[in-house]
Amino acid sequence: MKAFLRIWQEADIKDIEQHLMVVGELSAECYHCHAIGLDLNLDACPQCRAFFKYVGFRRKVDANVLIRFCQKHPRCSFIDFEDFKKALSKDGARKLLDM
C-alpha cells in the first residue's frame, strides 16, 4: 500500500527558492520571479525560465490533489509551504543578526 507522508529532511532553501511553484486556488506563482497566474501544468516559468523542481501549496490539500500533481509533475518534490516560509524567516533573522 502506498500513501503520502511528510518526511522531514534537510533541504537547500536557496535551491527551493529558485525552483518552486506555489499553487493557489486556480493558478500558480513562480517563487523565483513571482510571476503570477501560471498554468498548473507548466514545467518551467514562462517569464524567468526557472525549471520547477518543487511544488508547495498555499492551502491544505488532500491526497487526491497530490495524486493529480504527481501525475502532472512526476519529477517534482512536494514541500510544506508553511515550513518553507518559516525556514526563510529564520534565515532572514540570522542574516540581520550577523550584520
Image (cartoon, grey):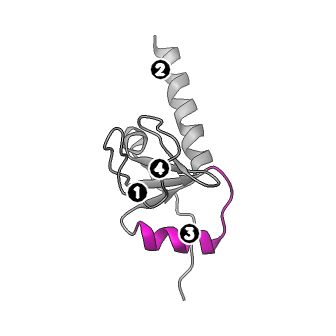
Q: Nearer the viewer, residue 87 or 27?
A: 27
Q: Earlier in the sequence, mark 1 or mark 3?
A: 1
Determine which residue is flagged by label 4.
21
As measured in the structure, the alpha-carbon distance from the residue carrying label 1 to the one carrying label 3 is 16 Å
Q: Nearer the viewer, mark 2 or mark 3?
A: 3
Does the segment drawn in magenta span residue 67?
yes
In percent of width and height, residue 34 lies at 48, 35
Q: Amino acid at mark 4?
A: Met
Q: Earlier in the sequence, mark 2 or mark 4?
A: 4
Kindly indicate whether the residue at mark 4 contacts the one at mark 1 (C-beta within 8 angstroms).
yes
Q: Which disc number belongs to residue 42?
A: 1
User: Which quarter of the rendered picture does the N terminus lie within?
Assistant: bottom right
As measured in the structure, the alpha-carbon distance from the residue carrying label 1 to the one carrying label 4 is 9 Å
Disc 2 packing (10 Å; few <14; some 14–19; many ≥20): few
Q: Quadrant of residue 77?
A: bottom left
In percent of width and height, residue 66 lies at 56, 69
Determine which residue is flagged by label 2.
95
As measured in the structure, the alpha-carbon distance from the residue carrying label 2 to the one carrying label 4 is 25 Å
Q: Earlier in the sequence, mark 2 or mark 3?
A: 3
Label 4 secondary element: strand
The vertical placement of 20 against 43, above or below, is above
Disc 4 packing (10 Å; few <14; some 14–19; many ≥20): many
Magenta stretch in the rendered image:
58-73
Q: Nearer the viewer, residue 44 or 6?
A: 44
In percent of width and height, residue 16 lies at 41, 45
Q: Amino acid at mark 3?
A: Leu
Q: Amino acid at mark 1?
A: Leu
As measured in the structure, the alpha-carbon distance from the residue carrying label 3 to the one carrying label 4 is 14 Å
Determine which residue is flagged by label 3.
66
